[in-house]
Image (cartoon, rainbow, N blue to C red):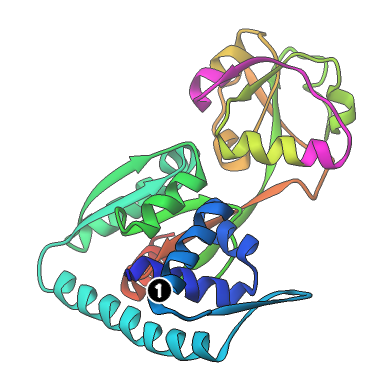
């Protein structure tokens, strides 16, 4: 039995769904089901029973979860106590756009409070979630994750179309996805969350955009747009300070946005970070 398995039971109970819990935990559903089965076999008890709406705790599951919560809370409290008694090296995970445009003030503020920081940049919120639940990072900055007791929404922002200043679209007040069909697009490559969010939205609305170039980082994308290699779509914070050769245009699709969240078990760290934003 592990602390991680206790956490899995806690999240499944909160979401009342193994599928939803796997999304919150950034873990595949088969992997989560396997861990639950291993735990139940070790305990010799069934912790969940299925119903029309998903799953719910059995009597044995309720007993297990009550004790597991005490252990998890105790571990977090103990970890926090010893963390506060020495100079803390904070391991922070973040998406590229957030590390560039959101975190500089946060890291500077943490430094002024006596913390050292180690920033890990990854293209995927799933990877940030994995690092967080494996306790390899103390805080994670991700997008489009479910709000819960350790995930706190920071901001919601729209996406924008970025075009060369000499583009025929440059003078438009807003542009819709339908107007971008058959235009050359320069898009982030997988597993970038920006690309996944874009493709999910387009698939839901039966719109097809052609990715003539796929690339992993925002800065090269903007350089290619400036060179008239195509158009791109990026979150608002990434286009606030564009060169004069580029123009950011709002999208007509107001529902296409992202929610940026902080993941941390530490209330103290959460408060420090929110004060710096």
**Residue 96 sits in which quadrant?**
top left
Q: Mark 1: which secondary structure? A: helix
Q: Is residue 21 left or right of residue 114?
A: right
Q: Nearer the viewer, residue 143 or 7?
A: 7
Question: Where does label 1 land, which residue?
Answer: 6
Q: Nearer the viewer, residue 125 or 69?
A: 69
Quarter occupied by the N terminus: bottom left
Q: Position of residue 277 (x, y in %)?
A: 44, 59
Q: Position of residue 192 (x, y in %)?
A: 55, 34
Please report the bounds of the magenta region as a residue range.
201-221
Q: Position of residue 253 (x, y in %)?
A: 83, 43
Q: Position of residue 32 (x, y in %)?
A: 51, 59
Task: Report crowding for label 1: few under 14, some 14 to 19, many 20 or more residues within 10 A (C-alpha).
Answer: some
- The image shows residue 68, relative to residue 37, as above or below, that is below
Residue sitting at x 38%, y 63%: 273
Judge whether residue 200 can be spotted in this image: yes
Is residue 251 found inside the magenta-colored segment of the image? no
Q: Nearer the viewer, residue 12 or 117?
A: 12
Q: Is residue 203 left or right of residue 120?
A: right
Residue sitting at x 14%, y 74%: 82
Residue sitting at x 55%, y 91%: 59
Is residue 203 found inside the magenta-colored segment of the image? yes
């Amino acid at each position: 039995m592990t602390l991680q398995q206790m956490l899995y039971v806690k999240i499944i109970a909160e979401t009342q769904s193994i599928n939803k819990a796997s999304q919150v935990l950034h873990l595949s559903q088969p992997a989560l089901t396997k861990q639950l089965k291993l735990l139940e076999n070790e305990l010799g008890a069934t912790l969940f029973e299925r119903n029309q709406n998903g799953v719910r705790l059995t009597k044995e599951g309720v007993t297990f979860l009550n004790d597991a919560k005490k252990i998890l809370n105790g571990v977090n409290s103990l970890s926090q106590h010893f963390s506060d008694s020495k100079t803390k090296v904070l391991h922070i995970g973040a998406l590229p756009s957030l590390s560039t445009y959101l975190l500089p003030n946060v890291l500077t503020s943490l430094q002024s409070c006596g913390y050292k920081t180690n920033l890990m940049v990854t293209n995927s919120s799933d990877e940030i979630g994995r690092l967080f639940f494996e306790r390899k990072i103390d805080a994670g900055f991700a997008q489009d994750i479910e709000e819960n007791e350790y995930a706190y929404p920071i901001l919601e922002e729209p996406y924008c179309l970025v075009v060369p200043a000499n583009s025929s679209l440059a003078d438009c007040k807003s542009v819709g996805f339908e107007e971008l069909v058959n235009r050359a697009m320069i898009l982030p490559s997988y597993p970038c969350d920006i690309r996944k969010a874009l493709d999910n939205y387009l698939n839901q609305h039966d719109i097809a955009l052609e990715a003539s170039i796929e690339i992993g980082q925002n800065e090269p994308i903007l350089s290619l747009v400036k060179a008239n290699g195509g158009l791109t779509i990026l979150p608002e914070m990434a286009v606030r300070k564009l060169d004069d050769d580029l123009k950011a245009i709002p999208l007509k699709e107001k529902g296409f946005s992202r929610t940026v969240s902080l993941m941390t078990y530490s209330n103290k760290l959460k408060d420090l970070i929110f004060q710096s934003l």
